[in-house]
Image: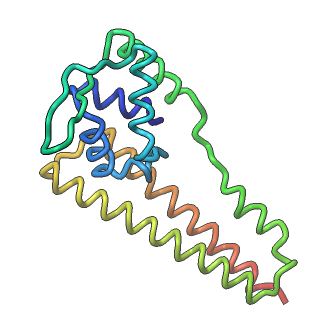
Amino acid sequence: MTRLLVLGMLDVQPMSGYDIQQALQLTDAERWGGVLIGSIYHALKKMEQEGYVAVTSIEQTGHRQKAVYTMTEAGKTYLQELIKDALKTSSVLYPSTLYSGLSFYEKLGKDECRKALQQQRNTLQEEYDAVKQGLAAKDAAMDHNIPPMVMLVMDNMLSLIKQQQDFVDKALELLDAEN
């Protein structure tokens, strides 16, 4: 995903690693894209070696220099491959740690299990709130003109979190219904 996002950004305009990092942090790519922001520089260097990006200039900013990258023709072809792969790869992810924990919940006392599930519920609520805040910030920054595909992504993220919250609530109800 790092390569896809970096090349996607370079397809818009030449940028430095720092500029890409700032843009991805602004869009909260670590949350929705599974990208570690610190991996951008490594990806740029590797893709430069592979011929997908090239340094077009070195800019002086204070006492530091920053390389400005652009995408090569090979990079444009590679970006299309990455997009196709991302679109056709299954995105179904199961909450395996939660499922595993629920499979053996009876090994805990009811109170400990309830407490852990409530912590899970709180974490999900924090995630939901963070996505909602990100959406509001993006909406304001884009003057209430969020592209439909981005809106679809954001709505789906919120739906997935809500579905997990409902699942945890049902698990808590089952736990409370036990004698």
Vertical order, 63 against 42 (above or below)? below
Q: Residue furthest top?
A: 73
The image's colouring method is rainbow
**Relative to residue 43, is residue 170 drawn left or right?**
right
Instruction: Give the x, y percent position of residue 70.
Output: 26, 21
Residue found at x 47% / y 57%: 159
Image coordinates for residue 164, horizontal then vertical, percent:
58, 63
Q: Which of the 4 image quadrants contains residue 115? A: bottom right
Which residue is rendered at x = 44% and y = 58% of the image? 158
Question: Up-down: is 131 above or below 112?
Answer: above
In the image, 29 versus 152, the foreground residue is: 29
Q: Quadrant of residue 42?
A: top left
Q: Give the mark count.
A: 0
Q: Quadrant of residue 175?
A: bottom right
Check the image and name the residue furthest to the front.
63
In the image, is 169 to the left or to the right of 55?
Answer: right
65 relative position to 8: left or right? left
* Quadrant into which the C terminus falls: bottom right
Foreground: 149 or 49?
49
Q: Give the left or right position of residue 28, taking residue 142 as reference.
A: right
Residue at the (62%, 75%) spot, across then down: 169
Where is 111 relative to 145, above or below?
A: below
Considering only vertical position in the picture, is 146 above or below 95? above
Residue 32 x, y percent position in the rendering: 44, 49
Give coordinates of residue 111: x percent, y percent.
Answer: 74, 89
